[in-house]
Image: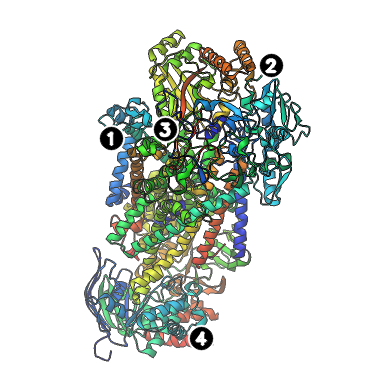
Amino acid sequence: MTTRDPLVEVSGLTVDFGPVRAVDGLSFTLEAGGALGVVGESGSGKSASAYALLGLHRGTGARVGGSVRVAGTDVNTADDRELRALRGAGAAMVFQDPLSSLDPYYPVGDQIAEVYRVHRPVSRKAARARAVEVLDRVGIPDAARRSRLRPHEFSGGMRQRALIAMALACEPGLLIADEPTTALDVTVQAQILDLLHDLRHETGMGLLLVTHDVGVAAESVDEVLVMRHGKEVERGPVARVLGAPREPYTKELLAAVPRVETRRVVPVPPQRVAEDEAPLLEAVGLRREFGRGSGRVAAVDGVSLTVHAGRTLGIVGESGSGKTTLGRMLVRLLDPTAGRLRYGGREIGSLPEKELRSFRRDLQMVFQDPVASLNPRRSVGESVADPLRAAGESDEGRIRDRVGELLERVGLDPGRYERYPHEFSGGQRQRVGIARALAAGPKLIVCDEPVSALDVTTQAQVVELLSELQRELGIGLVFIAHDLAVVRQVSDEVAVMRRGVIVEQGSADAVYADPQDPYTRQLLAAVPALDPGLAAARRTARKELARA
Amino acid sequence: MRQPSVISRRVAASTAVLVLAAGVAACGPEDSKGAAGTSGAEGKPQKGGTLTVLNSNPQQDFDPARLYTSGGGNVPSLVFRTLTTRNREDGAEGAKVVPDLATDLGTPSKDATVWTYTLKDGLKYEDGTAITSADIKYGIERSFAAELSGGAPYLRDWLIGGADYQGPYKDKKGLDSIEVPDEKTIVFHLNKPEGEFPFLATQTQTTPVPQAKDTGTKYEEHPVSSGPYKVVTNENDGERIVLERNPHWSAETDEERKAYPDRIDVRSGLDSAVINQRLSASQGADAAAVTTDTNLGPAELAKVGSDKKLAARVGTGHFGYTNYIAFNPKVKPFDDPKVRQAISYAVDRTSIVNAAGGSSLAEPATTFLPERDSFGHTPYDHFPAGKTGDAAKAKELLKEAGHADGLTITLTHSNDKDFETSPEIATAIQAALKKAGITVKLQGLESNDYSDTIHSAKKEPGFFLAHWGADWPSGGPFLAPIFDGRQIVEDGANFNTGFLNDPAVNKEIDEINKITDLKAAAARWGALDEKIGEQALTVPLFHPVYKRLYGEDVKNIVISDWTGVLDVSQVAVK
Amino acid sequence: MSEALLVQEAGAAPAVAPASGARLFLRRLRAQRAASAAALVVLLLVLVALAAPLLTALAGQDPNAYHPDLVDSAAGGVPIGSFGGISGEHWLGVEPGTGRDLFARIVYGARVSLGVALVATVLQIALGLVIGLAAALGSRGVDQVLGRITDINVALPVMVIALALLAIVPESFPRPVLIALVIGGIGWSGTSKIVRAQALALKSLDFVAAARLSGRGKWSIARRELLPSLAAPVITYAALAFPTNIIVEAALSFLGVGIKPPTPSWGQMLTEADTWYQAAPTYLLIPAGLLFVTVLALTVLGEGVRTALDPRAASRLGVGTGTAKEGAA
Amino acid sequence: MTGFLLRRLGGAALVLLALTALLYAIFYVAPGDVAQIACGPRCSPAQVAQVTEQLRLDDPVYVQYAHFLQGIVAGRDFSTGTGTEHCAMPCLGVSYQSDQQVTQLILAKLPVTGSLVIGAFAGWLLLGVGTGVLSAWRRGRLTERVLTWLTLAGSATPVFVIGLLLIIVFCSTLQWLPAPSYVPFTENPEQWAWGLLLPWTSLALIESAKYARLTRSAMLETLAEDHVRTFRAYGVGERAIIGRHALRGAVAPVIALSALDFGSMFGGAVLTESLFGIPGIGRELVHAVKVVDLPVVVGMVLVTGFFVVLANAVADLLYALADRRVVLS
């Protein structure tokens, strides 16, 4: 790689899956040591392009056209042996889900050693030593011992580190990272991004980072390529593209990205809550335990909060913080182990299922997974009609009219009553879920990560819809999310959860502007910034926090 | 072995082959009649070698008290000597009873109620101790113990006090009706005249058992031998038995057992198809092999018949045995003799014989008694059905009986695949009766249920398949249990299925039992059979014929009309 | 195929699969050549079984009529003529011993084999559904009790129980129905395991939670939300269990505890033919061949059904897997 | 781990207890007078009454059952007439028909069935896994299609059909092999192997179909997983991916199914034993049922049930050991 040849040279790349053209004439180059971010929403062809760099489409039935040269190998024409020599040694790839990307049956160290031995004629023992070395390099403490553990014995962040270690083993000139932090919590994400940053500067290897998250790209690369429908939309230095986008789509995309700095747009007239107004829902010392005997753990460990009509309580926390358990307890999908839950002044925390029936429809929920939240074998109209039927409505005409109204209200064509969920996109399904919640005529809706599975542009639309509905109907909202920026956008009050307890609670502005709890501060510092300059500043801040 | 049915047990014990009396289409080409030893492999029989016996049923019961065998059994008779035994000759001669441990067939009192036997000199057990008459008495007594049940009912029925005696384990005093005035003499006191006592004395219950060696239910693991061989191995409840020469047996005291081989190796638990295959292949040790319980089935016969060499190694034998339809006259419409006669006319014996394995394995029967002289067989055909049934005559009779529009009846049979009371036979009857306007519904029962049902006075169906085999080759044990009114059992196993209680018949049975001249008695049994036949309480269907393979090296084939099976005490393998 | 494997295969379909109407299902089935051919064979067999009286009338034969003249009585009853007595009148020859027409018996035997297996399968599925749902939705105690019962069911030696039951039940009880009841009554544990596992998986899904929030009761949820989603694995299981049940019926008959003569069944014909393989091979080969073809066709059809109901496999067929673009993430 | 085993065995004991109680109940109502059968049909009512008393059949069924349980935990004494015989714990009673201790009967039959199962087991494992690996490796090619059809044919064939065909071909037509029969290994190892060759082959051919399918599907499933993509992306060759990663995914299910099959085969090889005339547990059991020999039936069902339940536990354990992701509970 002493030549002037670029590290990666792609021209006119096309990838077809059957009749679908996933990548449509993509061209770009990446010089040795450079870092390129490929950004796009789902279906934009960004991952398919990355896979083409290592010839991973071979044998899958996908058709690849154009030319791809990586580290001197013509990927599309190379024979299997040449390709194998490139993979791992010339260019290595880090995948999105670190758990499923490692063989669950073998120790992590062995897996790294196996890869190493494919490319280097060394003994088993030497390969194992190399594995320990690279594991140590990516910051896994006690690497020699941990190299003998299997992937499931690692935490999510450590697994991703292990994958990166595998990539480092043969010292490749190029690292391809496909959504390397998407499955991780924001604080762990920051650590991994920092690691990639450091490695790149130390080893001088090139980085091709594929991500849907503009912030992640901003943190890590020099140059960014925005993709949509398999084509390049815009390419340029990261600061320029993010700071002064030229293309309308890029602008739209950037506008939709929630920013932790953005306050809630308070609707007119601003909702005023009298201090003495009775809360809609009040939880006192809610606790929920799972498991039995010695395996017993408290997922929610004494949480108290109130929700008022017409206002939004945001609950933010990382995975495992207990926020989903809390949300389910609030609508009594889960029974609290201890504590009280009062709705409209009445204790409902311990009501048996039968007596709960009359309250059921007042407390609704919008779920995270738009796939699992609708019965795939029932038409969406039927799903929306369910609360109506359960309420005793039996006039088919009236049900149809009402469902039509609701579908229209959430922005869907009422004529699609008979359609099945798989015929809808994720955002549309989430709208159906909202319509179903509305059909019950609720006083309060708990939204559990309602937008985390959606692309940013869709995200913005759904968030907007929820706000509108709240304004119109005066319902109380509980908005649970891991994304600090989204929560800030929608919430009046915010509660930050960690390990089953609320560490900080208050008005959204107060919590975001002046976090009191160190954990809140850590969280906020971990949020990727769109501005590369700010990103660098935050990186420094994180290092200080870590040292502190 | 304790099997659910006496009859099937008998079949198992009886196997044989033989050369046959005139009129029977024998398949095998062996020459008949000549002196024993002319059939089988060439050459004069020599002592030595090992005879292998390949059987399907293990010898689970090897206790003389528990065995239910005609004439002392086959393999058991190599170990157990009895007061009398069957004559080891081919054919009809073999249906005679001869002395064994005793010097003669017994001395009856004038009215045949007291029988006295004297033992030969020089009789010894395998350990060299002398056999005494007290041992024979003890052997008989222990067969009364509930622990050792399984034998034939005659001793219990005939001996004075037998009905109440519970065996020596519970009743130490013993049975007074058996006297042993000295070591050589044994006297039996019967409660009625029984001219056929010498036949009964062939059963293994008259085998001597030394009381000191009696271990109750465990005795069968190593019964003490009085015969030419002793037990050296008895594994897995009779699955593998090895017999070797008993040095204390003397050929001089035993005219019947030839005991040519040095060793007998009995292997059982084998599939019947495997046995026949091994015998036909006749390789290695199987060349010197016979079977004492496995017949050739119809399919195997079809195969063997096409192979001349193989056909030469098939023995054919007859055992006193009849398969028949039984009626229960207590059940309508079988109370009407005309209905029973109509059915007698309608049966198609050709189809039935085919279903039973074809004409080589079954002979059509019109008499209840088997067609052997020793039974006193008298030919008759009261309701001639011809070869394939007389539907016209049957219809006529039904009309007379008031069933002009036909009749629907149920035929009970077993589900066993035994070619005897099996579904195929029932279906053949169903098909034949259909021609006479009789609709037959079939009721197939599992074997236990079947034998329970047809032998229960209370549950007995009206119309069913049955069979009967001789406990010894005479009319007495063939007719009395079935037709003697005093043998009707209301609350136990009943064999008088027609509930015949005719004083004239009962009286004639008593009269014949007084006769000690067996030949004269036979003629009277034959006449009685013909007379009972008029009542149409049964429809005789067929008598089975046994065909069995034996190995290439087996010599001196003897198949008597008593057992119908190859006699292992006669064969030689050298 | 063993139950464990059936459970594994039928249960492999994900709990949440896109809805597919009957028409789509048929289209996917038709897209598989082997399954289509198998379906034709099965259809033909079913028609033959249904039209048994008609077909035998056409052949001019009665399955139970004896023909003593067609067998060689002295040779054990072997059919006269070559190939087991095949002739213009007796298309497949006659049975040794009795001379009964084999074509008629085979055709009537198809009724028994298919009918018994069908009833048994339906029963297995029905029992398994009820028990599986009760275990999944009932209390912990109910689940544990049913779990133990399932364990006992698994440990039951089928043949012994069948033997015992066939001995106990009165003769008047129609035997084919009884056999179907025995096979079905013993073989439900596979279905119940699948149903329980799938129902538990479904129960944790958000749409069930949503139904609860609508105010629906447990059983209303089971009927409206769970049952439709259980259809795919259960139908798959049934399709794969059906040929197995044919084998079980034949095996019971083969052991002599199945269908009673004179009613013909293939398994029972095989038992009788067992000894005749040398003297009259066609007598063995015809029912054996038919049994093989039937079971093979049903198995292939079962595989086809599985593929058609499995969205992952269906996508390979490229029939009806279109989903909205945005949701393809 | 120990706790898991203890819990499983405790549960197994309960299951077996229920199973034996069920059998006592079934046989209690079954027709057939046990005493009459044991005594012989020509026994007089008085003799039958004596036998009834001697076998303690006049006790109520729960008392009989209690005696049975007592025998298992403490042993029992039985009268031989001249003395008593001690049946040491675990005493399963004494056969009504042959006076043999059931424990000894079973011990005598175990090596027979064991010989059959072990040989067949080795055969089907080798054949099945081999076929599975080959068809996963050659996926999408002619080899796989052929193997898939062969496997389907295997799973569609009843064991008695395959067995019969093998006998016809190898014993009758070609005469390469002797008629199958059982010779104890201790007596003549060579004859033991030759005699069992066909039974082994039949069972192995049938059972291996399952394993081929299982291995293939487990491997294909693994091949579709993300981690295989990882190793491909790092230049690991196809042979290592098949042999090391894909096969590893099939190990757990194959081991688990093997344990189950191995256990259930002890009571489940009835058909094979009947067909080939192998005097093993299955055949003995069928015979015992027919003669209503309750102690033998219960004893054998208990032992075979024990194998099944044990196999279930072992299967779970092995599965967990082979697949460390599963947590025992």
Q: In which quadrant of the rendered view does residue D160 lie?
A: top left
The image position of residue D43, as x and y in percent, is 64, 29
The image's colouring method is rainbow
> Foreground mark, 3 or 2?
3
Q: Earlier in the sequence, mark 3 or mark 2?
A: 3
Q: Mark 2 and mark 1, same subunit? A: no
Q: Which of the labelled discs sits on residue A545, or is there none?
A: 4
The local secondary structure at tag 3 comes to: loop
Q: CA distance from mark 1 to mark 4?
A: 97 Å
Neighbours of disc 1 within 10 Å: few (<14), some (14-19), many (20+):
few
Q: Give amino acid for label 1.
A: Ser
Give the chain of mark 1: C
The local secondary structure at tag 1 comes to: loop
Q: Give amino acid for label 4.
A: Leu
Q: Give amino acid for label 2.
A: Asp
Give the chain of mark 4: A
Q: In which quadrant of the rendered view does residue B493 lie?
A: top right
> Foreground mark, 4 or 2?
2
The correct choice, above or below, for B376 with respect to A503 in the image is: above
Q: Are marks 1 and 4 in contact (CB under 8 Å)?
A: no
Q: Is residue C91 something one can see in this rendering? A: yes
Q: Which residue is mark 2?
A: B111
Neighbours of disc 3 within 10 Å: few (<14), some (14-19), many (20+):
many
The correct choice, above or below, for A505 with respect to B416 in the image is: below
The image position of residue D116, as x and y in percent, is 48, 53
